[in-house]
Amino acid sequence: MKTLEIRGLSKTYSNNTHALNDVTLKIKEGMFGLLGPNGAGKSTLMRTIATLQDSDTGAILFNGVNILENKDDIRKKLGFLPQDFGFYPNLSALDTLNYFAVLKGISKSSQRKNLVAEWLEKVNLYEFRKKKVGGFSGGMRQRLGIAQALIANPDLVIVDEPTAGLDPKERNHFHNILSEIGEDKIVILSTHIVDDVSDLCTDMAIINRGELIIQGSPLAEIDKIRGKIWQKIIKKDEIDWYNSEYNVISSSLFMGSLRINVFSDVDPGNGFKAKDVNLEDVYFKMIPQGDFNGGK
């Protein structure tokens, strides 16, 4: 059983941004979702696990070995798709993936050729294999990034905002790929898209302002607030009053009006109706509405 243990990880940047504050997590084999708004510290945590930057304090243990002290060892077992991924624009998809396969230690040319073809098929790029990557759309580049992260059959996979730029069909295809590989590996899915975690992950955490808010299974976290989320449609100019009178956790436009969701242990009355709870409600309850902003 593979395990990844993060102990007391902290990171402050030179501009005094506290990106991580004493984060502790234990992650087992399977799909693990890391949720949080932009600026929560997700990318900082992913880059630190991937040994691309150092923390100020703390340790990260993969199968009991501190990866911050054994970076070369973990890099052989790691597949990483960062949020911003660059390619050589004049290389074809075939040559690009072959290049990454060489970097990842796949030295036999026949094995490399077969793996490159296999992964180009899996990410629906085989028919474009001879096309220069510089001419790819954002979604095509993302799919090629997924292939390079997985081609060497890594034990630990980190994907940071992986469905950004993918249309719904591509997103579903990507979910299928991750679900296939997630059975005997640790796969960390870092995202602000709640549905990605809800669809794929059996364990999850929510991080905000560099701090761990919760860790647990999505179903267990949903059960904790079941029967405590209430919904009502109001006029847009009424929102300030409702914010002052109720614990409004989220709002969205609905046919020119506002649909609001509030958290309450008891029926708040006043026309509110019980809502069928999902993981998005857990997320909004844990993250104050004013915290959805940009950052690292």
Image (cartoon, rainbow, N blue to C red):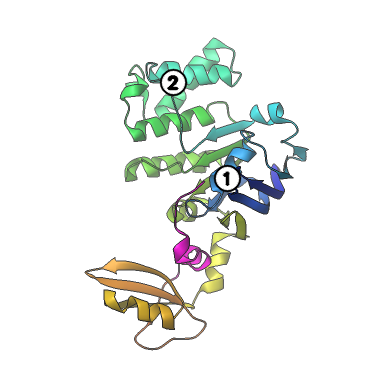
Question: Disc 1 or 2, which lies upstream in sequence?
Answer: 1
Where residue 46 appears, as percent x and y from the top left, is: 58, 42
Q: Is residue 6 above or below residue 215?
A: above
Give the residue at mark 2: 117
Q: Is residue 96 left or right of residue 202?
A: left
The span picked out in magenta is: 277-296
Where residue 249 appears, as percent x and y from the top left, is: 44, 71
Q: Residue at x 59, y 22 (%)?
A: 104
Give the residue at mark 1: 15
Residue lying at the far bottom of the rendered structure:
269
Q: Residue at x 75, y 33 (%)?
A: 69
Q: Is residue 133 left or right of residue 7?
A: left
Q: Residue at x 56, y 49 (%)?
A: 41
Label 1 or label 2, whichever lies nearer to me, is 1
User: Dot 1, crowdedness within 10 Å: few (<14), some or many (≥20)?
Assistant: few
Which three-letter amino acid code belongs to the residue tagged 1?
Answer: Asn
| Magenta-span inclusion, residue 259 | no
Residue lying at the far top of the rendered structure:
109
Where residue 130 appears, as percent x and y from the top left, is: 34, 16
In this rendered view, identify the residue nearer to me: 274 or 254: 254
- The quarter holding residue 204 reads bottom right
